[in-house]
Amino acid sequence: MPVLAFPGPQAPPPPAVTVEVPDGWEPVPAGPDLLRARGAGTVGDPIEVGVGTHRAAVGALAEQVVEEVSTASAPEGSEVEPVFVVEIGGREWAARNVSWDEPGGPVVEVVLATSPDGSDDAAPFVVATGRVRGSGVDDDYDVLQGVLETIVVGAGA
């Protein structure tokens, strides 16, 4: 009788991940993510960051993962930018910005995905999501970008 195990060949453990957040930010329950944090933006609206994994079909690319995750979270009528590539900590990430309006003001969500082993395709992918909202969205986006630029995946995390 076959034995299934976690971690194991069919269910590898998630990679080690770290992210630096500003003083005053707090970790929040991660839910399905590996980690999640929140801090107050320039006018008090929250800035949120989460890092988790996403299982994709074998052969999927990080760009496809970003498209899938960002499309799933985007409300109808959202402005969805094209996927682009950024380098964070010597690692390539596929990225996309999605924005929409809510009664409390604009919302901008950033979705990033990378292969944990650095190859062009792998499953699961590491996915980072950040969100800013409200009247301070432009300044808060800069803070969010700074936090996302500190993500380290794998050895040394």
Image (cartoon, rainbow, N blue to C red):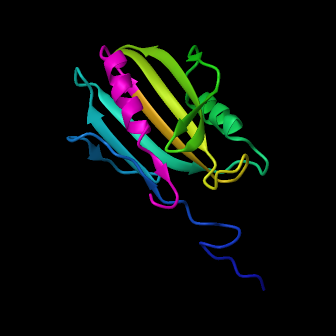
Q: Residue at x 55, y 31 (%)?
A: 73
Could you tell me which quadrant the C terminus lies in? Answer: bottom left
x, y percent for residue 24: 20, 40
Q: Residue at x 56, y 16 (%)?
A: 78
Left or right side of 87 for 58: right
x, y percent for residue 41: 27, 26
- Chain part drawn in magenta: 132-157
12 in the magenta segment: no
In the rendered view, would you say 89 is above or below 84? below
Q: Which residue is more in the foreground, 50 or 149? A: 149
Left or right side of 73 for 67: right
Q: Which residue is more in the foreground, 135 or 142? A: 142
148 in the magenta segment: yes
x, y percent for residue 123: 69, 53
x, y percent for residue 80: 60, 19
Could you tell me which quadrant the N terminus lies in? Answer: bottom right
In the rendered view, would you say 136 is above or below 127? above
Q: Residue at x 70, y 48 (%)?
A: 56
Q: Residue at x 52, y 58 (%)?
A: 154
Q: Is residue 32 visible to the viewer in this orientation of the structure?
A: no
Residue 142 is drawn in which quadrant? top left
Residue 38 is drawn in which quadrant? top left
Going by the picture, which residue comes out furthest to the left? Answer: 24
